[in-house]
Each structure stands twice: as C-alpha cells, then as structure tokens.
Image (tube, helix red, strand yellow):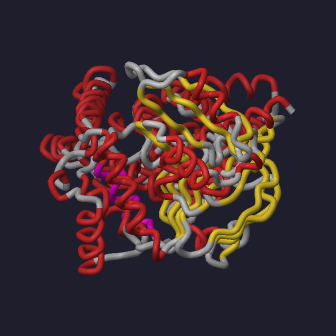
Amino acid sequence: MIRVQALSKNFSNIQAVDQVSFDARRGEVLGFLGPNGAGKSTTMKMLTCFIPPSSGTADICGFSILENPLQARAQIGYLPESAPSYDEMLVGEFLRFVGEVRGYSGKELHRRVSIVIEMTALGDVKDQMIETLSKGFRQRTSLAQALIHDPPVLILDEPTDGLDPNQKHEVRTLIQNMSEERTILISTHILEEVEAVCTRAMIISAGKVVGYGTPDELMSQSIYRNSVTVSVNGANPKKLLEQFDELDFIYSVERVPDRRNGIVTMRLYPKEKESIALPLEKFIFSKKIPIENFNVNRGRLDEVFRELTLNQLTK
Amino acid sequence: MKGFYPIFKRELLAYFRSPVAYVFIIIFLAANAGCTFFLGNFYNSQQASLEIFFLFHPWLYLFLIPAVGMRLWAEERRTGTGELLLTFPVRLTTTVFAKFFAAWLFIGISLLLTFPMILTVNYLGSPDNGPIITGYLGSFLMAGSYLAIASFTSALTKNQVISFILSVNICLVLVLLGWGVLSESLNAIFPVWISDLVSQFSFTTHFDAIRRGVVDLRDLIYFVSIIVIVLMLNVVVLESHKAS
C-alpha cells in the first residue's frame, strides 16, 4: 500500500530526511518515532505530496507521488501536525467542505459526513464554530476530515499531541478500530503509544532510520529485556543479593530504590537476555522468600529509543 | 477544475464571516464617496457622468485591494491550513484561481454597492450610461489585476504586513508608469515612443480608455493577461516554497 524508496530531503544544507525506505501493507499501523526535528513530519509531507522529495520516490497504492500526485493524494487521509482547520467554520460545514473538495455531493456527501461525525463522536459540537472547540474536539474534527473519503491510507502526524489521557485513549481506540482495512502511518514521540497501537515501528534520528521492527523486536534490544524485578518484604538486602547472585542463570543483580517501607527491590539480569522467569520462580518458591512483586520486563522502549537516537547524534 | 467550486465558496464565505469584510465595504464606500464629492468636486463639475468617480479608482485600489488580498496565502501559511488545502487532490492552479476569484467577487460586490452613484447621476441629469457600464467593467478588471498582484505577494510571505507593503509598491509602480508627469519628463529626454511604450504597461493608461467608454480589446487583454500571468507566478512561488 505504501512503498517508500530511498526518500531524501535536504533544506539548503540540512539533510532533513536521508534515504528512508520502507513498506507498509494493509492492516498495518506503522509508528514513526523520533526526537523533535528528526524528519518524521518532513517524511509525511513528502508522502502527502505537500513538499517534493530531493531524491527517491514513494508509491501510495500504486500511484507514484512524483508522477501521479493527485491520484496518490486521493488515496490518503492526512492529519497534519497541530490539526489545522478553518477556524471560522462550523464543524459540520468544515467536514462538508472537505467532502466537496474530495468530489462528493448530495446524499453521498451527507452520508459520509454523518458517518465520520459518528465515528469521531462529534455529534454534540457539529454546529459549533471550530474556533470555540477544545483541543480534543479540534483534533477529532481534523481526524474526521481525514476519514471523509474512507481512504485506504491514513497519515496522522502526532494525532494525540496535546490531548488529555482520556482523549488519547479515545483516539488510539479509534485508530485501532480503523486499522484492519487500512494502512496507517502515525508519528509520535510518545513511546507508550507505539506499544498501544503500532504493529511495527520505525525509529528515525537526524533523518536516518536507526531502528525498525515490531515494538517487541525493538524492545528486545533493550538491556532490560527479560530482566526480572523482585520485591521482597522484610529481607536483608545483602543476604538477598548474595542469594540471587549465586544462581547460574543470573548475569548480574542490582538493587533498585523502593520508597515503600521495609521492602527491598532487586533487578535480576539474565545471561544473553534469556527468559529466567520459570527457574527464578522455582528458586524463590523453594527458598520460601516472601515476595511482594514479581515483574518480568519485556524491555524498555524509551531506553532503546535513547540508545539508538543518541548514538546516531554522536556519530 | 475539480475542487474549484468548494474552495471558491469557502473563501468567499470566509470574507463575510469576519468583521474585516464589513469594515472593508464601509471604508470602500466612504472612500469612494469622499474622493468623488470632496476631492473631485463632483457637484461643481456640473456633469452628469461618473468620470470623476472612476478617476480616483486607480489610487483608491492602491491601498484597498492589497488589504483584501494580503491574507489570501499568508493566512493559510500562518495557520497551517495551507498544508491541508494543498494536500487535497486538487491542482494547485485550480486552488490559486479559486481563491483569487472568491476575493475578486468580494471586491465586485463592494463595487456594486456603489450603485447609488448611478442613481444619483441619473436623477441629477441624463448621463450617457454606456461609459458608466464600461467604467464599472474596467474598474472591476483593474481591481482583478491589483488583486492578482496582492495574491502573488501574499504567497511570498506569511507576514500579512510585508505582503501588503510589497503589493502596494508593485501596484504603485504600475500606476505611475502611466502618470502624465512621468510621461512628460520621459518625453523631455527620450523620443516619444519610449514614454508610450512605458505607459502601455500601466493600469491607468488602459483604464482611462475604458472609463471613457471606449472598449478596446487590447485594454481588456491587458488586464486579463496581467491577472493570468501574475497568478501563474503565484503558482510558481507556492511550488518553490514547498520545495525549499
């Protein structure tokens, strides 16, 4: 559905996007991750044919962004960063306007506007001026606008930026519900979002792709992968540390600060990031250690993110 | 031309949604009346014609039209809506012309609201209504040329003030090229054909002919081609902005 080949963009002497290539199929939610200014938005602007690439190309549902930009755009629903819309219009009127520009009229237009209003729960504000809307409603209006032509490809630039946790949850649910039939590209710098909605993620830093894979694959690069955090009530920290350290499947043990009274927390790192939950559980059981918590870490995306993006910058 | 009508309609409605439109219309009418009756001494002229009324249009438009046009693209850029507008499956040329025509029609409506002038001269005397009609046509075409320039300068910057000043200056040059004083001083130095050639580029030269009731195809072509050429430049500017 989306095929990107060596897409690059330089602004005078700054290489904003450097040889980015990827494929995204139907049903896939691809997350663009990266620090501010990494080139996420620039890549999206090239895919939506808002700015032309300096080199490289991309196909949207088989339409080249260079040769058939109008057809390519027709396949895309785009939510630009900070969700711009015409402030002086009413929500319903704005959605009708976008529908008309996309070539709908009459009953079909009416039907499509009703559907997107329902999908994004805008019914209560449809006769309100966009200027007067809260950030959450504005974001949803902009999302509704992107959905009006039921596009096979959705490109959403920071769709949850500036929303409160409830609104974020709503937007994520919406994205998940829509993902089956579509290819969705979202950019974000909120890492939990990647775990919550993305089937694959791409980490970009200084215009280059530095990490690519499913969220789980990316997390497996973390030093915390398969480490276990154990909290024990009323134990002697030193003795506990020694006890764990003797185990042959443990690579190292460290004490983690814990504010709770009388509770000692340790993090145990496995050898070669292997799973140690089962043998560790057996050991704890056999020694009758009174544990409070037992937590297996899948790995931390923020740590992988920092590792990959900071490495790139120091290079 | 797909997408022309909705973009045109939205743009036109946007004028009437903001108080700026009403302020503009009031100033436009007041300035027209002020120039005709006070500066132009309409009553003392003892003529049942709108010559004096139209005489001031090139100067009035110099400030009023850039005020209408300055927001056309600068505003889209400032608020980010341009990114939405320019990623719709619509040709850039269509979008540029749609926005232009909306603003032009808005100016046309303001111009039509000066109709009491027609009633006045018809009440006071029996004017030749031919030059009045051609005067309005010429004035509307000339307004379109000013507006195309304002639209073009608006695409150059996201600052409306800069856009306004730029278009006022470009339009001023195009007005002054046909100014009698300039022609005379050119005639003193160069052969006459030079000043003739220079004045051919001016708004005033072509407008003067039309408002006198002489509709020469060349004058119409002048205004239409200014509009088309400048709007095509407008498209090029928007394209190159996107590239850098």
Q: B236 above or below A238? A: below
Q: Is A249 covered by the magenta stretch?
A: no
Q: A97 above or below A219? A: below
Q: Quadrant of residue B125?
A: top left
Viewer-proximal residue, A29 or A43? A29
Viewer-proximal residue, A95 or B199? A95
Q: Quadrant of residue B129?
A: bottom left
The x and y percentages for residue B127 are 25, 48
The x and y percentages for residue A315 are 87, 33
Viewer-proximal residue, A270 or A279? A279
Q: Which residue in the rendered view is the most extreme toward the right?
A: A315
Q: Is residue A290 visible?
A: yes
Q: Is residue B15 visible?
A: no
Q: Measuring 75% from the left and 46% from the top, which residue is drawn there?
A: A271
Q: Is residue B47 left or right of residue B120?
A: right
The residue stretch that appears in magenta: B3-13
The x and y percentages for residue A22 are 72, 64
Q: Measuring 42% from the left and 61% from the top, which residue is drawn there?
A: A175
Q: Is residue B93 left or right of residue A205?
A: left
Q: Measuring 61% from the left and 32% from the top, which residue is drawn there?
A: B170
Q: Main secondary structure of the magenta part?
A: helix
Q: Measuring 52% from the left and 73% from the top, which residue is drawn there?
A: A27
Image quadrant containing the C terminus of chain B: top right
The x and y percentages for residue A312 are 80, 37
